[in-house]
Image: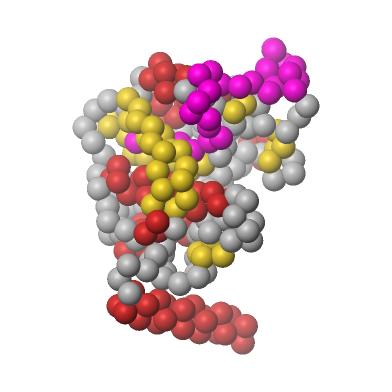
Amino acid sequence: MGSVWAARAQRVSKRVRSFWRRRLNPAAPWCNVCGYCGEFRDPTNGANLRESLICGLCGSRSRDRMLIYSLGKALEKEPPLRKWPANRSLRVLETTGHGGHPFFLAKKFDYYNPRYDPDEIAAGADPRKFADVQALPYGNEFFDCALSSDVFEHVRLDQNGFSEIYRVLKPGGVFVLQAPYIHTMEKTHILVEPRGDEDAYLEPPQYHAGHTLVYRIYGRDLLARLEGHGFSTEHSQTEIAQHRISLQDVFVARKPGSRVS
């Protein structure tokens, strides 16, 4: 119990220091997830800022903050996420969300954060906790928003995944997508090609997080592919120093209809 209270006291102390830093220096960077103004750690020493610049309070990475920044713009919400008004009628799907933001999304919205585990899915596990984006276990027009950060490069049949996201979104629903992307590359670079039930390795296999196979690195044809599923799509490459968000790409796709808010 003592360690719990010590952790709470540390968080309170960080919030107090954060408050005074912003009061004394309004230009200081702060986290658009939790509102913290303070240390953003870079254990990569500049080698991979997108996966680094870790918030000293909520643990969000630069990539996480870009995801939430893009969602906030789409929903016309001012940062930080921690202060967004709760709306339990708004249903949000995130494919395997990690970091600091899932905690806040779960407090604000009807939030589903399933991960892919074939054994759990086959056993009929809770669809809030386990799902296959290639065959989502939800009804048509079920969600208001969908988020996916560095998942679709691992989805074997990504066309099925995009089709499923479109299907489960309500008209006007928004899909925020992050994935390995090279804008100077016209076409998506295929590393592993699905052929029936088999995978053909066109290059030596690459893995993320030590065990998750990478099927592709996206090129500019990603926009046309998303639009081919019915989305209207915007791509941006942005750096937001105010929130310690490094330069990176993000796609915001909408299903036609009235805007979700």
Q: Is residue 220 magenta?
A: no
Callout count: 0
Residue 118 in view in this figure: yes
Residue drawn at x 27%, y 32% as measured from the top left: 172
Does 184 appear above or below 15?
above
**243 or 130, which is in the foreground?**
243
Residue 105 in view in this figure: no
Does 12 appear above or below 256?
below
Q: In the image, 97: left or right of 242? A: right
Residue farthest to the bottom, as pictured: 2
**110 or 155, which is in the foreground?**
155
In the rendered image, which quarter contains the N terminus? bottom right
Residue farthest to the top, as pictured: 196
The spot of residue 210 in percent (x, y) is 74, 44
Residue farthest to the left, as pictured: 258
Residue drawn at x 53%, y 36% as measured from the top left: 179
Does 86 appear above or below 147?
below
In the rendered image, which quarter contains the C terminus? top left
The spot of residue 260 in percent (x, y) is 26, 39
Q: Is residue 202 magenta?
A: yes
The spot of residue 178 in percent (x, y) is 49, 38
The spot of residue 74 in percent (x, y) is 30, 42
Q: How is the image coloured?
A: secondary structure
Span of residues in magenta = 174-203
**107 or 221, which is in the foreground?**
221
Residue drawn at x 54%, y 49% as measured from the top left: 50
Q: In the image, 122: left or right of 92? A: right
**Would you identify the image quadrant in which residue 227 lies?**
top left
